[in-house]
Image (cartoon, helix red, strand yellow):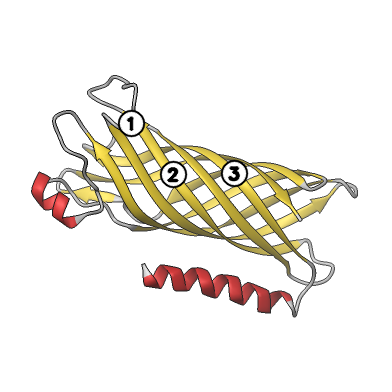
Amino acid sequence: MKKFCLIIAALLVGSTLFAQQLGSRFNDFYIQYSTKGVQGFGNYENIHNFNTFTAGYNRGIQLGENSPVYFVPGVNFVYMTKCQGNGQQYATRKNNGYNLFGTGVPVNFMYHVAINKAWGFEVNAGFNAMYYWTSSVRMDGMEEIDIFCRTDSQKYKFPQAKRFNAGWQGGIKFQVSKVYFGMQYSQDITKFMRDDDGSFRWRGFDFMVGIRF
């Protein structure tokens, strides 16, 4: 966790120093909804989509005074949730379901095309790192467990999930004045969970809306 916090601090401080030597810069805040599925193998190939809600901050740094290319590091907070039990939906996640909480650090390169002073569109591609703080998982007949906890893993004999994951993303945004709307595809490179019967990585489409200043 300490290493992850140092990565965030280094990116934010470094981007500020970087911006002093280059062109214009911007800040933006956004919210994002995703349906995270899996690229799975073995017993994990039938895991269904998780509803994922994200709130984040980006800092854009223009790579040259007249360049359309921006370097965009950021940080976000992620909540993943799902109600599930033996193929049917349950009314509350408290009684039967999954809740995961984490922090992500996306780093993108963005190409901005200005249509006029108010309108424009952008394409972006980059990588991201994710650290999961904790999870709350409750299934029928079981007490609440944390899939990232080694003690719970040994007690209930299930594979321990990895707190740290990395992946890539690419997408497009449409900007209207200070507001933008976007969509991107993201996929993990590292495996979130694995055992002798299989493994899986998260993947899915992200839909976002943000404000830039």
The answer to whether the residues at label 3 and label 2 have Cβ atoms under 8 Å apart is no
The answer to whether the residues at label 1 and label 3 have Cβ atoms under 8 Å apart is no
Work out whether 137 lies above or below 3.
above
The answer to whether the residues at label 1 and label 2 have Cβ atoms under 8 Å apart is no
The residues tagged by marks 1 and 3 sit, at their Cα atoms, a distance apart of 22 Å
The residues tagged by marks 3 and 2 sit, at their Cα atoms, a distance apart of 12 Å
Q: Label 2 is placed on what type of residue?
A: Tyr
Q: N-terminal of the two: label 1 or label 2? A: 2
**Quarter of the image where one finds residue 182:** top right
| Residue 97 position in % (x across, y down) | 29, 32
| Residue 141 position in % (x across, y down) | 13, 30
Helix, strand or loop at label 3? It is strand
Q: Crowdedness of circle 3 by 10 Å Cα count: few (<14), some, many (20+)?
A: some
Q: N-terminal of the two: label 3 or label 2? A: 3
Q: Label 1 is placed on what type of residue?
A: Arg
Work out whether 27 lies above or below 42.
below
Res. 46 visible in picture? no
Helix, strand or loop at label 2? It is strand
Q: Label 3 is placed on what type of residue?
A: Ile
Q: In the rendered image, which residue does mark 3 sit on? A: 31
Look at 45% across and 56% down and name the residue there.
103
Q: Crowdedness of circle 1 by 10 Å Cα count: few (<14), some, many (20+)?
A: some
Look at 33% across and 31% down and name the residue there.
93
Outermost top residue: 88
Q: Crowdedness of circle 2 by 10 Å Cα count: few (<14), some, many (20+)?
A: some
Q: In the rendered image, which residue does mark 2 sit on? A: 79
| Residue 63 position in % (x across, y down) | 74, 70
Q: In the rendered image, which residue does mark 1 sit on? A: 93
Report the side of 204 relative to 92 (left or right). right
